[in-house]
Amino acid sequence: MQLLKAGQSTLRDPLIREAFERDLVRVPALEAMESLRVRQVLADSVQLASDPDLAASLELAGYSVDGLRKVASGNALEAGAQLEALEQRFGRDKLGRMTLGTSAVMIVRPQPMFPDNFAPGILPTGQALAAALKGHRIDDMVWRRGLTYAGALSTTGSRPVIYCSGTVVARQWLLTAAHCLTEISPGKPPGPDTLRVYLPFQGGTEQVLTAVGHVNRDMKAVRVDQVTWIGDEIGVPYPASEQAIHDLSSQGADIALLRLNAQDLKALPNPIPDVRLAGRMGEGIHSLVGYGRTDGGLPAGLSLLVGLREDPPYDVDNVLYYGKAEAVGNGGFCSGDSGGGAFAGQVNGTQARLDMVGVISALSDSGDGTATICLAGTQMLSSVVSARNRTYLCGKVPEACKD
């Protein structure tokens, strides 16, 4: 009965669901569980193919929507063979999630791959599914909904464009990079009415573009009530040139705060985790979260990537420095990630509270041009751990600094 309910809740395509229900009658429970896993992933691939960005990847690999749907609703052995071929093309991570490339530790898209009452954003392995069915509440698997604090900074207007990433701290303020404001409003700080923050996994319907004109996922827009940045506090003029932006980054002053509209936040269907400003750097794995490019190519659609680093940054004069990363998914960052957050520990979407250590700011070219493909000799973040920056941020948002 549990397997039947799981299949009915996750296999929305009637042909695929009917094929699984036939397996329930014909094969032992373990084989039926594997059938559900296989058909879930194939059905998910069909859904992914409705996304133009991912459809292109599938087509390049030789897969069509109709072909995948036919296999997913057919013989279980043939479906398993097709899934194996797909996995060779796209790969899986250690947690059983299908990835879009070997360099990505975790790629998340706001369009849900499963209904929120099952396993949002997770493509479960047989073991993960079995665990979910052994007394665990299925709706406790909140990996995707746990990333609702990652915002994207956008313009307003009839064709809003996303420029940067950001992090909702204390559930009401977006902490981002000051240089993101200059891209939207060169010469003077932008007014609140010229900005929007788009939040993932909130069931929104708004359309928004990337900087190169690609239509992004449906997201929920939140209005901005106030714009403030650290330069006003420490006597740094609003950057009006590339050199001024570089100086801002090198001083660890690439920090801006946007107060989000309380009414819009109250209307969000899914809660935002509690993001606090870390009081110390911490040791071990750190995570970087942003909506930037996932490789050196042009960005297609909006992708939220969590990169993991085993080497904590070092803090010098309000700036956090990371050395070279092997790939963006391995803790590097790229265009569009600016303003995103660095967090102590491994972000996996299950945390009720996160400790933020820095704001993604700039890449420093290593001298061989690698910054152009997002692999820089040095990666710079404005520290939220350093005394100066923490004093400013805690003065503006004291709730973010409480233990």
Image: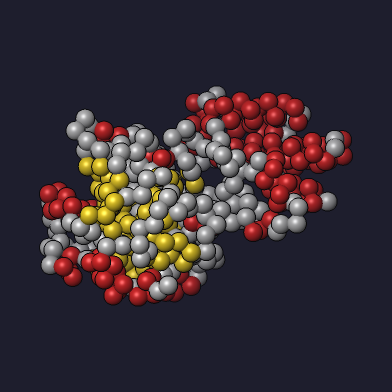
Q: Which of the image's four quarters has the C terminus?
A: bottom left
Write down the quadrant of residue 386 in the picture: bottom left
The residue nearer to you, when weighing 195 against 173, is: 173
> Would you place residue 28 above or below residue 12 in this image?
above
Q: Which of 82 and 208 is in front in this view?
A: 82
Please state the horizontal and vertical placement of residue 10, each as a whole percent of the image. Answer: 69, 48
Q: In this view, does 249 lie above or below 301?
A: below
Q: Is residue 207 left or right of residue 394?
A: right
- Residue at horizontal 57 percent and vertical 26 percent from the top: 88
Q: Please state the horizontal and vertical placement of residue 260, each as a whole percent of the image.
A: 37, 69
**Residue placed at 37% from the left, 64% from the top?**
278
Of residue 110 and residue 373, the one placed in the foreground of this image is 373
- Residue 17 locus on image (x, y percent): 75, 42
Residue shown at 80% from the left, 39% from the top = 30
- Number of numbered callouts drawn: 0
| Left or right: 261, with 15 as reference point | left
Residue found farthest to the front = 283
- Image position of 299 with respect to 383: above or below: above
Q: Left or right? Give the position of 243 relative to 13.
A: left
Note whether residue 295 is visible. no
State the image coordinates of residue 286 (x, y, percent, origin top left): 41, 50
Q: Which residue is drawn at 48% across and 64% down?
A: 353
- In this view of the protein, can residue 104 be seen by the observer? yes
Name the side, left or right, on which 167 lies relative to 39.
Answer: left
